[in-house]
Amino acid sequence: MATNGSNRAVAAPQNDPNSFAASVKDAATAGFLVAVLGFFFIGIRTDIAPGGLDLKMRWGAWIVSILVVFVGRLLLNLFVLKTDSPITRKIAGAMPSGSRFAGTGKWLMRALFAFALVLPFFFTTFFPGKDRQFIDLAILIMTYIMLGWGLNIVVGLAGLLDLGYVAFYAVGAYSFALLAQYLDMGFWFALPLAGILAACWGIVLGFPVLRLRGDYLAIVTLAFGEIIRVVLLNWYEFTNGPDGISGIPKPTFFGLELKRGEGGFADFFGIAYDPIQRFIFLYYIIFILALITNFVTMRLRRLPIGRAWEALREDEIACRSLGINTRNTKLTAFSIGAMFGGFAGSFFATRQGFISPESFTFLESAIILAIVVLGGLGSQVGVVIASIVMIGGIEMLRNLGFLQQVFGSGFDPVQYRMLIFGLAMVLIMVWKPRGLISTREPSVVLKEKKRIGADMVAQGEGH
Amino acid sequence: MEYFVQQLINGLTLGSIYGLIAIGYTMVYGIIGMINFAHGDVFMIGAFIALAMFLILTTVLGFAFLPVVLLIVLIVAMIFTSAWGWTVERLAYRPLRGSFRLAPLITAIGMSIVLQNFVQITQGARVKPLPPQIQGGITLMEGSATGISVQLSYMQIIIILTTIALMAGFTLLITRTPLGRAQRACEQDRKMAALLGINVDRTISLTFVMGAALAAVAGLMFVLLYGVIDFYIGFLAGVKAFTAAVLGGIGSLPGAMLGGLLIGLIEVFWSGYFSVEYKDVAAFSILAIVLIFLPSGLLGQPEVEKV
Amino acid sequence: MDAATTMKNSDQSTPGWDRDPVLSVEHLTMRFGGLVAVGDLSFNVGRGDITALIGPNGAGKTTVFNCVTGFYKPTEGRIVMRHGPGRQQDDVETLTDSGQRWKTTGNGAVYLLERMPDHEISHKAKVARTFQNIRLFGGMTVLENLLVAQHNPLMVASGFSIGGILGLPSYKKAQKEAVDRAVYWLERTHLIDRADDPAADLPYGAQRRLEIARAMCTKPQLLCLDEPAAGLNPRESAELNELLKYIRDEHDVSVLLIEHDMGVVMEISDHVIVLDYGVKISDGPADFVKNDPKVIAAYLGVDDEAEIDMPEVREDIEKVAGDGPAKKKPTARSKAAPAAKKTAAKAKPSSKASTAKTSTARSTATKASSAKASSAASTAAKPKTAARTAAKPKPAPAASEVKIANAGDYPGSQPHGTKKPRAGGANNLTRVKGIGPASEKKLNALGVWHFDQIAAWKKAEVQWVGSYLAFPGRIEREEWVKQARVLAKGGETEFSKRVDKGEVASSVPGKRGAQPKKKTTGKGGKA
């Protein structure tokens, strides 16, 4: 309900003498709304019972939810929305503002980079008991960072709204899995091939649709993503359908497998074998892949093609008047983005050792897009921060086992993961519609570098 | 032949449901130019409300006269789902009005995730089966040669008639009432409409409410027709309904209905004659093909590029 | 019209733009559904000239631009761009027949723009353009804007990005050259201090200049500017003139511009083409065009409301049109600029009705055509006018009873006319949409009194009358003949109903009051 306030607070006079009464009334409205909305969902639960469906009444939960919202809204009204000195103002003052944040962005990026470089050893040293879990989470976050950077080329730079990015992730993963299965190919050989295949798919899918605008492009890319998933699901002979492909080989370190015993990595270097080595190795693979993605993206931004992408986002018609072949330019953005998605996909396949179409649903596309948009379109640091906050934060819910002691053993915080994820998406967007880092850095400078405010930067396809 | 007619009837029934959802998409797109991604999930919410209300009336209160029960369920589902539609707009879209274009799309996706997971948590992830309530029908063609007879079930008759009645009422609402006029004015030029004294926020809210109400009707029909719902039905139905809206020409109400019917027919015929597994591929391919070759849809206004 | 008249009206010799055109637009037609935005338009843009395309709002100027720069595919017609001197007519014909898009020739190259996609027109044919509503890359810096304009050479230099990613030195050199060129144009346009600012931050006038600089960075041979002076103050406008002349003289770039600001047009243009309703109504040097009665009629909208052949009005209009700075010495430019503004303001009004009001207010004679007086003019005054004009022509044996002195000047053939309306009186011709009281009077003067007369017009007559009334093409567009056929049979059109009800304030201002009562008395009759 928090978002309710932003408008209402403006509408209500700040020094309303009936401020308290108004607050209570407003909170009561919110409570009533929850009563209505929750009646059929919180108050009643349909359950399968022998001989059909059964209704279970949960009036307690219903009333509690109403009260929670009423009290929460009231407190919000009294201390934030309808007061002369909202608490948030103090908090906002303490938070770095957008422009200052951008200035520190460089240092932040360096600090993050340094930390990422030593991350596995940091965890093995300081959290020896939980190192495996943390490194695994770091790998997951890093995968999303890479995907976010790949999609950032398409959405952030070229301004093409792609809701089917997961299709290329799937193409990459399945390319590697199938190459390994049918041709017995190793990870390092398959990786570039997977990227190229994904890029080709990017061109094949992009060619017919890239002249569409904005939301239409979004919905067609979504459709393509779903088509690829449905085909993977139903082409049983080739892809093994819903059962997926298992036994995908692990990457080797210059031919050395990370396994116990003779001829393994540990054996070759004469160190003791530890399963954590495999995680550390995987972490560094995705770290390097992500770095390559970032490096190429940053380079491309300073090249004519990158500037053409951004120009395309700003004004496509002007681009055409300047002799830029917009179709080809869009296609390069689409296929380069797809290529990085393909790389990330084959990494995903080798990391999991098992893939099935279940991993490539629309939700995955939505998460990646959310990371890009929440981070701030076109901002590389933004993607990193958004990935850490959204993926890391959500995964942290798995560690909230103590809540079970509070709410009883039936309570499973993991269940609320996606609910909270969705709410966070809405709240962050309402709070910062342009994303966390929204300024743009010019790609070429004559005298003095000035960052460009978000209000000037177009978001593409919306003319 | 009998098989064909049977598929035709099934397709029209399914198409009616898609059409009703598609209207919600098309109206919202028309008025604020965004894809209300959460609309499919509002439909899902409507289906759950209808199911729960139906159970309350039949098992708890012991009503037995089906027509009255269905009427009450319909009205209650429409009212409660409208409240959901209103809330979604109020929370996720209104604060972002006039903001940049991607923001409401992201909140819409966020809302879609929220609704799905909310229902999953509160109602459980397992499917909810409801035994068929309206049985029987009319046998139209007795296929002696093929052994297949064409059945037009009462359920299908109810669905098609309700859809026609709602469409008629709705067309009247949009073309003849001040509300419809305000809505069309907002579609044309929101700023100007506001200057002329139209409460734009209220009009947009009402658009969401109307879309949600129609989605609730579709939800009830879905429950009765298929007898199985879960928290995930909204996504696929939503994408297909949006396809229908685009196919018919987004922004056009008759277009949405026509598109819905076409998508329903395509899906049913594809399943009937080719393969059930790839029916979604057929629907999505149609979407892609229509957008590429006929971006303004069947009944939409072609857009001239302004230079 | 076009070529023939142009030549007759201008100097005896062929004008430069016909001898050495950089761009030839030939029989260009652009239809949007049923609407003909540009109809059979032909003109040449001379190499090294500044050519202005002018005309009232909605005349189709921007449509012509969009056709030339490839944003619209013309319905019909050929658009030839020539690199290298001369018409290269043989090469153009071979190219047209070959189905290719361009052809290198002995002199350079020729391009058929209507066959080329928009980006190739800029890249290959070297036609650059700006936009009426400025289209900059607002979120990119000024410098970046100019580098985007050099996309194609830089792409090649960067080895299509591959060399660029690897950081090859050849790209760095190319980028430096590109920045140098950008800096050159930034200095030319006084934007060098804002090079690192986002384009959206610039004030309006600077944005206009930046758009020109950006277009110049594509190294064009023809620069198309869509209302470059719109919204500029007089000083900026004068600077713009200097810039355009500099571009023409120092860079050998031909300029085609759409402009409403007559100060700019008259001062810098070597060649002016006037469009109205998608048809060329005048073509020639600035001095010729500004004295062309058709131009005056089109701009000041006298065709419908006021009588163009009243000497006082005419003088007055000429004074308005000629009062631009072109008559003054170029050195007095800065002083002349405000005057130019004034002229433009007068010439600019968007609707013909309002223009007509401007002119009526300035003329005692035309006051008669405003308000009630106008109704009087078209009813009571009718016989008098008719008598006067009927007396004017000399009798000669021909199809029409009414003779017009210079009938041969107009293309097509004069329609049949009778000296007097038939028994029962003349029809109210204003019931035809498009015929105002003034046109009605002129038609009466031609001996055209009845709907059936108009209904009988063939193409030749339509063309002649169109030309005679100084709005070629309009009769076809407004379908007078078709309307007249209906009305002649006693039928009604949407418009005639509105005339009968007295609702036609939009087309015939000031008539709302007295007129309709008389008109509704008889079906089309005037008794």
Image (tube, coloured by chain):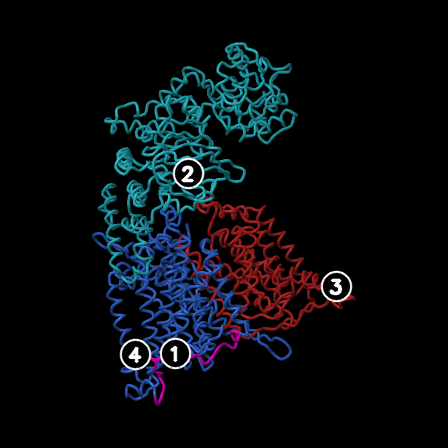
Of badges 3 and 4, the one in the foreground is 4
Nearer the N terminus, badge 1 or badge 4? 4
Q: Position of residue C433 (x, y in %)?
A: 55, 28
Q: Which mark is residue A400?
A: 1
Q: CA distance from mark 1 to mark 2?
A: 80 Å
Amino acid of disc 4: Pro
Residue position for label 2: C91
Q: Nearer the viewer, residue C117 or C371?
A: C117
Could you tell me which secondary element the residue under label 3 belongs to? strand
* Mark 4 Cα-neighbour bin, 10 Å: few <14, some 14–19, many ≥20: many
Which of the labelled discs sits on residue A120, or is there none?
Answer: 4
Q: Pointer 1: residues within 10 angstroms few (<14), some, or many (20+)?
A: few
In the rendering, what colour is chain C? cyan
Task: State which region is magenta.
Answer: A238-262
Q: Give the SS element for disc 2.
A: helix
Give the residue displayed 41% in from the left and 43% down from the top. C102
Residue B194 seen anywhere in this rendered image of the structure? yes
Which chain has been coloured blue in this picture? A
Chain B drawn colour: red
Tell me which amino acid carries mark 1: Leu
What kind of secondary structure does the magenta stretch mostly adopt? loop
C497 magenta-colored: no
Q: Are marks 3 and 4 in contact (CB under 8 Å)?
A: no
Q: Quadrant of residue C92?
A: top left
